Amino acid sequence: MPDTTIRTNSEVVLIGAGIMSATLGLILKELKPDIKIEIYERLDIAAAESSDAWNNAGTGHSAFCELNYTPEGPDGSINPKKAISIAESFEVSRQFWAYLVQENKVPSPENFIQSIPHMSFVWGEKNVEYLKKRFEALHSNPLFKDMVFSTDFSELKKWMPLVMEGRKESDTVAATSMAIGTDVNFGELTRSIFGYLTKLEGVTIHFNHEVQKLKQKEDKSWRIKVIDLATGQKKKAYTKFVFIGAGGGSLPLLEKADVPEGKGYGGFPVSGQWLKCINPDVIAKHQAKVYGKASVGAPPMSVPHIDSRMINGEKALLFGPFAGFSTRFLKNGSYSDLPLSIKTDNIIPMVAAGIKNIPLTRYLIQQVRQSPKDRINALREYVPGAKSKDWVLERAGQRVQVIKKDEKEGGILEFGTEVITTADGSLSVLLGASPGASTAVSIMVNLIGRCFKDQFETPEWQEKLKTMIPSFGQKLNENPDLLKEIRKDTATVLKLNN
């Protein structure tokens, strides 16, 4: 029989049609307009997994309210380093999004970003002391200078009436607020970027296409075997550079690529659920993202928050997420994902990480066993007057926490985003979850710097990067005047509170 396999050639192949691939594809196309890009997505639409509004926190994780980014040390000191880094990266993303709006590359900003205060809320003397120390550690930094701290009951009632309703004035409570916080619908943003990108010459997106094999050839280029799930047609894609940004599906593809840099990596899947409010009167009472402290052993994606969102053009109110365990790596994945990911090179790191994270295992078991009453009781810690009839359970996204080799520990569980790039720069893979989407622009600019090093250093590319990201090459947290100017400019373009 004749070989009917379809063959394509391109400079870049992006696997997964989420915010990461969209961001990387568009930046590359801006830097090199004649570049040829092929995108493969196994589902029938873009941004249906981690980038979808129901599947992520939507805070534009700017570190304004997420307490897990400011850990407390054994001596009681607060380490603000991660929060400052994430806040800086979010400002970079805002600049890029403002550039896209100004250049009419994406529709009106109201479609994907809204102003909303970001708050942290705690109760109990120990937690109030922690929040005050966190405020003091962050407030001196230009990125957080607008943060406000309060223990005043009447003031907190004005900030978040739904959360304070039904509490006693004698309660020991505290909160911080950042009025310049945002709600970001990464699903809408991703689809808008792909909508523009795929109209450009040299860019093709293939939905319902699953990557089955990746193999590097002797000349360092890649051959990728793909199947069209709708027709069964087999395809081979040949390319110089591959980016795997497939969410939970990235780890199995990294294993298929069989590169030395990928050895020893494993993944621990964590599922999620929201309580979604269905009472319009209750939804209308809350206009903030209010984050609390996570339970002991909880993964970052499970930090509890009562969250006002805009989804599909309508205001929504969510609480959660409640974590759970599933062997799937994707919301639309297979129960065999985890077993099939266990290989000889990662079994020791995975076992070692498992032994050292018994609190996480206990936490997930407790979450899986929760009854509807347990979930409502958890909600009532944040919304004392919550009625069970006003809330329904909604399935959230699936995350895969990174497990990697460690010389001392054998294996460690990473709660963050990790980019693995081959020595020759021909393959880059993004693993992990939070803060992910909100720092996508910084992640992709750094990736381009490693994988397209010679072109990246040229005056043309450097100048273009400064056009897209005015602060490129500078640190905003070290330059208050520049930060003030850029926040004002991006707020005007994106129609946000400054």
Image (cartoon, grey):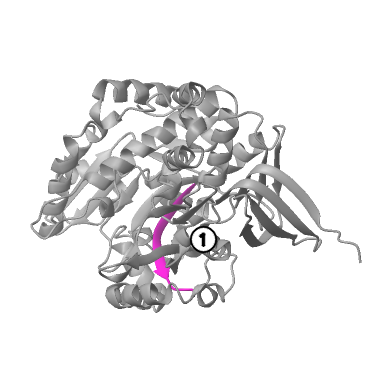
Observer-nearest of 265 and 178? 265
The amino acid marked with disc number 1 is Val
Q: Is residue 360 magenta?
A: no
> Quadrant where the C terminus lies?
top left
Q: Position of residue 139 (x, y in %)?
A: 18, 37
Q: Is residue 172 left or right of residue 292?
A: left
- Residue under the image location 48 percent in, 31 percent down: 456
Residue furthest to the left in view is 75
Q: Residue 391: in sight, yes or no?
A: no
Indicate the quadrant where residue 412 lies: bottom left
Q: Is residue 361 left or right of residue 238?
A: left
Q: Is residue 325 magenta?
A: yes
> Quadrant where the N terminus lies?
bottom right
Look at the picture and state if 466 lies above or below 117: above
- Residue at numbered disc 1: 259
Observer-nearest of 111 and 328? 328
Q: Residue 344: in sight, yes or no?
A: yes
- Residue under the image location 54 percent in, 34 percent down: 27
Boundaries of the magenta span: 315-326
- Residue under the image location 45 percent in, 59 percent down: 261
Observer-nearest of 133 and 183? 133
Q: Position of residue 200 (x, y in %)?
A: 69, 32
Q: What secondary structure is the magenta-colored segment mainly? A: strand
Q: Position of residue 9 (x, y in %)?
A: 72, 45
